[in-house]
Amino acid sequence: MAAGAPGGGVGRGLAGGCCLLLLLAVGGAAGPPGGLLYPPGAPTRERKELGGLWSFRADFSPGRDAGFVHRWYRQPLRQTGPVIDMPVPASFNDITQDPSLENYIGWVWYEKEVLLPLRWLQDDLNTRVVLRFGSAHYYSIVWVNGVQVVEHEGGHLPFEADISSIIQGSPGIPCRITVALNNTLTPHTLPPGSIQYMNDRTRYPKNYFVQNIRFDFFNYAGIHRPVVLYTTPSVYIDDITVTTTSSESVAMVQYQVSVVGSTLYSLSLSLRDQEGKVVATGDGPAGELKVVNPNLWWPYLMHENPGYRYSLEVKMQAQANGTLLKDVYTLPVGIRTVHVTSTQFLINGRPFYFHGVNKHEDADIRGKGLDWPLVVKDFNLLRWLGANSFRTSHYPYAEEIMDLCDAYGIVVIDECPGVGIKMLESFGNKSLQHHLVVMEELIRRDKNRPSVVMWSVANEPASELPPAAYYFKTVIAHTKALDPSRPVTFVTDANYALDCGAPYVDVICVNSYFSWYHDPGHLEVIPLQLTTQFENWYKTYQKPIIQSEYGADSVPGLHSDPPLMFSEEYQKAMLKEYHSVFDKKRKEYVIGELIWNFADFMTNQGTTRVLGNKKGIFTRQRQPKSAAFVLRERYWKIANESRCLPPIIKSHTLFL
């Protein structure tokens, strides 16, 4: 989110006073224990995609609660009233011509009926059928054939349920999947928000409310990522955790494997290179694999063969119900190390400079829905640009996107949905406990990814507030306990002398918009203000610094010379002023620069937003503005310079 951005209400509508169910009063939904491995096809596992058209109905009743009062999940949704077709994955907001759906806040209902293979439906104690959602915004309750199977709080992260006992033994009967989804944001959700009722009857209809938010992107909602059904044996590989260390000639791959369903099992592991050659073997649930002369995972433009990954094949055999069961799971593994000193960020012992972007999952019509053509286009643009990294601003991105980061060598700062934490009540214990669960879910999902080199626990919180000290100390300590192998940060726009959370991070990430939100139109102040910013932060904390956001809006095709705000020339001029300071300070302790933003994106309507935020160096349709060429020339120059750097570790190590 850009500093100083507006924070009005995304949603508005009519609802019956306190009857607007923000979150169904059934208690908080915690993430399931254990693993949540991505379900690829495998010799012992089958997978069925459930993308396409689902039946959809928004609950426009005064209290948004008709679906629960009348138990819509107990019958086909079409029998409860009018339904429309809704694509999955996609946001529902921009699909129709209905403005009330564009800004809808409350419960919406999805339904899909699917016929399953007969072999899945046999009353077989040795086969497990699982329903998995890549993500849904934000609070989900799922039923299968009228039986509730899972409840999940929060968007952007996967959740699943074992539905074997519901569907097995009923061949020929369609499997009816019903989802109730609520996109309301409260002070205790991530991201937070608040509902404001407008009680002035001379200006607003009865029960009129708005959803207030404190972040500058559109609050899209829906089933945003793939929904799949997959099978495993009843005894199965539930989770795999991998960490790596390396020297010039030897690497060690430490592993832990969790098996669920029986204590009587055996495990064998084979690590294969990209040619299929076995380079190391092991057995048992925990151990270490030795790799001689390893191919390390290197970032894009840092090596002639970036993104190198081995394949770790885990095979399980177990006895259950008098039968020998087998399961196989193959996990891509990148061997790389990360270290942070007081002045450098080191990958595999070599200084790494972040020259990249901030992004959004955002596009015309589909909103935040996963779209493969768009994903591939974005990665082609990133590599054209010479970008070696991005931050998942301001939430975890789809697993499919993360897979490509691993494969292409794009370095990732993996950020949780902790954006807009501005209200004092959002620093309380209820919010804190939910934040800890979200970090558990994020790390469980992405812990094995070589592209992920740092966790970000928040973006632009009100970290100057006194409760922020305990809050971020706790969240960061919890994150480090879950994953000691990576540094942790959050992205700040607070004053260096007032920030209560900064003492606990490993890398300082700071957002600033000099000559835009501050001293607008005055490019001449950037060198002094930006230099002062860096020197104050480094003098105070002696930690490396990333300029995690900077930029200016530009309207495509709007030109002005001399440069004026919102012109393409002004955006270019601002970048060049920032770059002149970066070039001086990256010789000292500045370790990265991430432009805001990769592409224009949709926001809440407001007097400063004309069809969204225009700070992209590409348009929302992925066409380059003038600034894209400035950044491309710079990034390729930096990349060529960095290839000549020796593997020197300066200063003392802060994170190891």
Image (tube, helix red, strand yellow):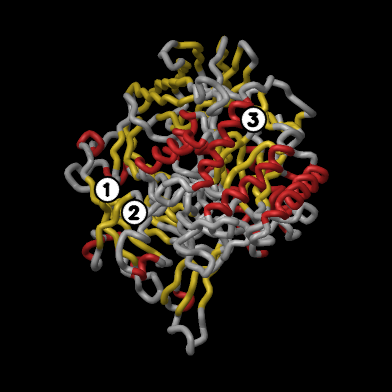
Taking 266 as reference, is 481 left or right?
right
Q: Which residue is pictured at 44% across the width and 29% down the height?
A: 237
Given residues 75 and 533, the one toward you in this image is 533
Q: In which quarter of the image is the N terminus?
A: bottom right
Q: Are marks 2 and 3 in contact (CB under 8 Å)?
A: no
Q: Mark 3 points at which residue?
A: 352
Mark 1 vs mark 3, foreground winner is 3
Percent x, y of residue 116:
23, 41
Whether 254 is drawn above or below 474: the answer is above
Question: Which callout, 1 or 3, points at the residue further toward the start of the chain?
Answer: 1
Q: Which residue is pictured at 56% across the width and 47% down the height?
A: 416
Helix, strand or loop at label 3? It is loop
Q: What residue type is labelled 2?
A: Trp
Question: Which callout, 1 or 2, points at the residue further toward the start of the chain?
Answer: 1
Given residues 125 and 368, the one toward you in this image is 368
Percent x, y of residue 216:
54, 59
Whether 315 is drawn above or below 364: the answer is above
Q: Which residue is pictured at 47% across the width and 34% down the height?
A: 384
Q: What residue type is labelled 3?
A: Phe
Q: Can residue 28 be seen in this view?
A: no
Q: Mark 1 points at which residue?
A: 52
Residue 404: image quadrant is: top left
Q: Mark 2 points at which residue?
A: 143
Taking 301 as reference, is 51 left or right?
left
Mark 2 vs mark 3, foreground winner is 3
Percent x, y of residue 65:
38, 70
Q: Distance between the residues labelled 2 and 3?
A: 47 Å
Whether 620 is drawn above or below 389: the answer is below
Q: How crowded is mark 1: few (under 14 residues within 10 Å), some or many (20 or more)?
A: some
Residue found farthest to the left = 172
Helix, strand or loop at label 2? It is strand
Q: Residues within 10 Å of mark 3 (few under 14, many from 20)?
A: many
